[in-house]
């Protein structure tokens, strides 16, 4: 399958926003560059109209300059090895690929061999979710990771002492990659395939993690609340700071109260607790 390649020069503050928006319209791989991002979409699934509308909406604010090309199927692991740098979330965790050396001075280390930029810790939503996980007691807890992606949040829960971790994603490609990363980090659990309604996880859970997007979170919020134990925690991200009010309103109506919110690069994350 051939891929369309878009080299997008843009202001730095818009890189992660564009990655998130492009992922919503079918782009499945990204590389951050000095000037912006390289974005890739399967040619057979490319939606030209949606792409043009998206670029037009950000062109002026992000100062976008665009170059389009076509390339054969890419060895994404090879490309990531050229471009992927480790990240640190405070002294909590060092996230690296298998081709990087370990670093001292961190309480935990996660090895992620990514095939796209989501779920590596680089994105502001994942970074904040990891940080919030580090603020909660996971020892002996049951944890559910909804829309697990590379599996990084499930792995973090395991490292923080969770007794049981359940994870799933709607994309079979993510499930394969997630299970590879589980193996790298000593998890014996397997990632499931499907939506939360299809997988039908059996609660109760002490902690539910959901880093997806606003519309899915609002649609599934009642399910998350129903799966939590009393005083259990729901960690959410994947939405912009201007969406916090809508998410908190929906959560409050289901007996969840806001414990903490954070923001990074215009992306927000919440810790909520069930009554």
Image (tube, grey):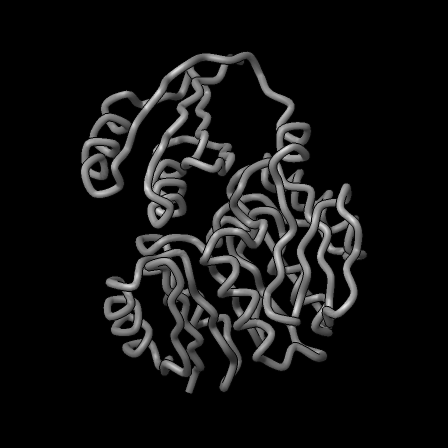
Residue depicted at x 77% and y 57%: 187
Residue 160 lies in what quarter of the image? bottom right
- Direction from residue 155 to residue 30 in the image, left or right: left
Give the total of numbered labels.
Answer: 0
Figure quadrant of the C terminus? bottom left
Using the image, determine if residue 91 lies above or below residue 229.
above
Residue depicted at x 40% and y 31%: 26
Residue 263 lies in what quarter of the image? bottom left
Using the image, determine if residue 209 lies above or below residue 207.
above
62 or 26, nearer to the observer = 62
- Direction from residue 237 to residue 146 in the image, left or right: right
- The location of residue 212, given as percent across then percent down, is 43, 53
Using the image, determine if residue 174 lies above or below residue 76.
below
Using the image, determine if residue 253 lies above or below residue 176.
below
- The location of residue 120, given as percent across then percent down, is 59, 49
Residue depicted at x 58% and y 73%: 205
């Amino acid at each position: 399958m051939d891929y369309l390649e878009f080299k997008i020069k843009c202001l730095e503050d818009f890189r992660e926003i564009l990655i998130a928006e492009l992922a919503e319209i079918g782009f499945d791989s990204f590389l951050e560059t000095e000037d912006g991002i390289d974005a890739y979409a399967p040619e057979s699934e490319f939606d030209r109209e949606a792409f043009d509308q998206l670029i037009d909406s950000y062109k002026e604010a992000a100062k976008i300059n665009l170059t389009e090309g076509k390339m054969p199927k890419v060895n994404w692991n090879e490309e990531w090895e050229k471009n992927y740098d480790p990240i640190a979330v405070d002294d909590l965790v060092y996230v690296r690929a298998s081709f990087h050396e370990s670093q001292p001075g961190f309480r935990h280390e996660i090895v992620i061999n990514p095939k796209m930029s989501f779920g590596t810790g680089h994105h502001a939503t994942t970074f904040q979710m990891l940080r919030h996980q580090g603020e909660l007691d996971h020892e002996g807890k049951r944890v559910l990771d909804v829309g697990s992606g590379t599996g990084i949040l499930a792995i973090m829960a395991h490292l923080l002492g969770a007794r049981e971790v359940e994870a799933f994603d709607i994309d079979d490609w993510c499930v394969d990659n997630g299970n590879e990363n589980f193996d790298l980090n000593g998890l014996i659990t397997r990632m499931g395939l499907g939506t939360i309604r299809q997988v039908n996880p059996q609660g109760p859970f002490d902690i539910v993690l959901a880093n997806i997007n606003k519309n899915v979170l609002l649609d599934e919020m009642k399910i998350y609340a129903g799966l939590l134990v009393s005083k259990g925690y729901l960690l959410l991200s994947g939405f912009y700071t201007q969406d916090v009010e809508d998410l908190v309103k929906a959560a409050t109506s289901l007996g969840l109260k806001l414990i903490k919110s954070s923001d990074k690069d215009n992306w927000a994350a919440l810790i909520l607790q069930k009554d």
